[in-house]
Amino acid sequence: MPLIPLHYTDLALAALLLLVNGGLSVRLSLGLERSLAIAAVRMVVQLSLVGLVLKQLFALESPWLTLAAALVMVLFAGQEAMARQERRLVGWWAYGLGTGAMGFAALVVMMLALTTAIQPDPWWDARYAIPLLGMVLGNAMSGVSLSLNTLTAGAVRERAAIEAQLALGRTLWVALRPVLRHALRTGLMPTINGMAATGLVALPGMMTGQILSGVDPAEAVKYQILIMFLIAGATGLGVLIATLAAARRLSDARQRLRLDRLALRE
């Protein structure tokens, strides 16, 4: 079955649903209509530009351009992860820690996927590398931002209990253990819930797109299972690295809790 093309009038009709949401926001005094409009316009512009960039990227088949595109995606993911944190580490740590964790996790997972499971020719083919990286990074970004936000908020909230443990001779890692566990669980929970609901509750976007384009459903399922495993692996690795590194930054050589290294988001 060939892919059914969409026209701009089809997109305009679908956009009417946003007007309904905006009307409800106004009627119920939610104050979300402006944010909804900005988000919708931003999405359309970003996707349109990405479509043009990817078209050129696929045509040029350059490993350096593919690498540059991947680097830009990681840097923007780091910015988004930092923006979602209520309390941030001061200095370059606020941006560099989450970005580095996501970049390393994505590199490990993508190299594994492209050189073993998928094996495109060449292995860095942008048609495979960039879409896969986008799905992996998007989920890793959510996990890292949630875990870091939970860790910093928990450290501030439980400051008295943590310092009481330190006064009793506990190391900071022991005193922080409940907060660390909560942060790790929070960062991983969306991925776990996503895997549990996939198939019965939701058909993921990649699988749905492949089926709509005429791919055999059984083959689409195999690709989706692979993607979910890659997402889970990258998110788990990124969350673990980011959370442990942030916890280390909140301490010093004298085993003190250093909340002075945190700043509220302006």
Image (cartoon, rainbow, N blue to C red):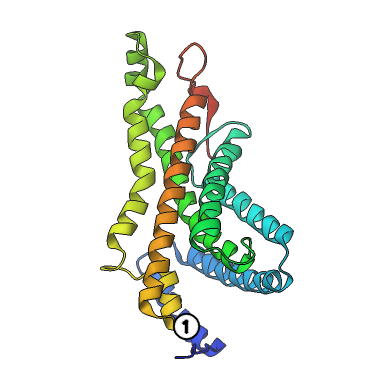
Q: Amino acid at mark 1?
A: Ser
The x and y percentages for residue 94 are 57, 37
The x and y percentages for residue 183 are 37, 37
Rate crowding at label 1 as few (under 14), some (14 to 19) or many (20 or more) other CA atoms within 10 Å: few
Instruction: Give left or right: position of 100 versus 191.
Output: right
Classify the position of the N terminus by image quarter.
bottom left
Quadrant position of residue 25:
bottom left
Instruction: Give left or right: position of 23 versus 7.
Output: left
- Residue 36 in view here: yes
Instruction: Give left or right: position of 133 versus 210.
Output: right
Depth check, front residue: 9 or 233: 233
Depth check, front residue: 40 or 60: 60
The x and y percentages for residue 137 are 52, 54
Residue drawn at x 58%, y 43% is: 99
Instruction: Give left or right: position of 68 versus 15.
Output: right
Instruction: Look at the numbered disc 1 and give the secondary structure of its residue.
Output: loop
- Residue 266 in view here: no
Classify the position of the C terminus by image quarter.
top right
Residue drawn at x 60%, y 38% is: 96
Quadrant position of residue 194:
bottom left
The x and y percentages for residue 218 are 35, 75
Depth check, front residue: 166 or 230: 230
Total marks in image: 1
> Is residue 74 positioned above or below 239 on the image?
below
Residue at the disc numbered 1? 213
